[in-house]
Amino acid sequence: MKSLKQYSIPFTGLKLGKHRFDFEVTDVFFNEFEYSLVKKGDLKCVVELDRQETMLVLNFDITGTIDLACDRCLSSYPQYIEIAEQQIAKFSEQDMGDDEDMMLLTKNDNEINVAPLIYEYINVAVPFVAVCTDEGRTQYCDNDMLDKLEKLAGGGEEPDDEQDDPTWDALKKIK
């Protein structure tokens, strides 16, 4: 978790207005999360923090590639993602209930760690079905692997040495 410290933004000394923070999201970032869907990636994250009197408005722009395994042929391929999200952090001492769209900051907070937000946005951007043969990509599915899977699934050649089973013959006569 020590490497995630670099994703903290100290906001106490910032003047009102917009401030820009740039972060690199690499394999080291994803290694900090034990059960991450993404294990490798090379992304750039730009956080524009708009400090106001009663809240912080965080605008995230994340672009780059993550390595995914194709659901069809199991080969690894780079998936380009582009993410634009917004998070609001409000200064308040009162509990505001379960509002997932807004973070709560107390007077004792002096920095905000954006690593969990970046991690969440990237994992939500992972396609539900990851296939390396989408339109516009130069890499195609591994044909050798697809042939092996087809053979194992029973879609390959029919066995030539079909033997008559007397049990099945008796059942066929029932028709």
Image (cartoon, rainbow, N blue to C red):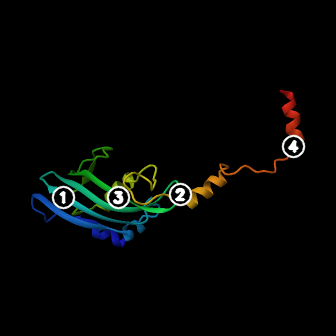
Task: Report whether residue 63 is seen.
Answer: yes
Numbered label attached to residue 73: 2
Q: Position of residue 82 (x, y in %)?
A: 30, 55
Q: Amino acid at mark 3?
A: Tyr
Between circles 1 and 2, the one closer to the viewer is 2
Q: Are marks 3 and 4 in contact (CB under 8 Å)?
A: no
Crowd rating for badge 1 (residues with CA inside 10 Å; few <14, some 14–19, many 20+)? some
- Name the mark on residue 165: 4
User: Picture quarter containing residue 96?
Assistant: top left
The residues bearing labels 1 and 4 have C-alpha atoms spaced at a distance of 72 Å
Q: Secondary structure at mark 3?
A: strand
Residue denoted by label 1: 48
Spatial CA span between label 3 and label 4: 54 Å
User: What's the residue type where badge 2 is placed?
Assistant: Cys
Q: Earlier in the sequence, mark 3 or mark 1?
A: 1
Image quarter for residue 59?
bottom left
> Which residue does the image show at 68% across and 49% down from the upper left?
154
Question: Which of label 3 and label 1 is nearer to you?
Answer: 3
Amino acid at pointer 4: Asp
- Callout 4: SS: loop
Residue 141 x, y percent position in the rendering: 49, 58
Query: Distance of mark 2 from mark 3, alpha carbons?
Result: 19 Å
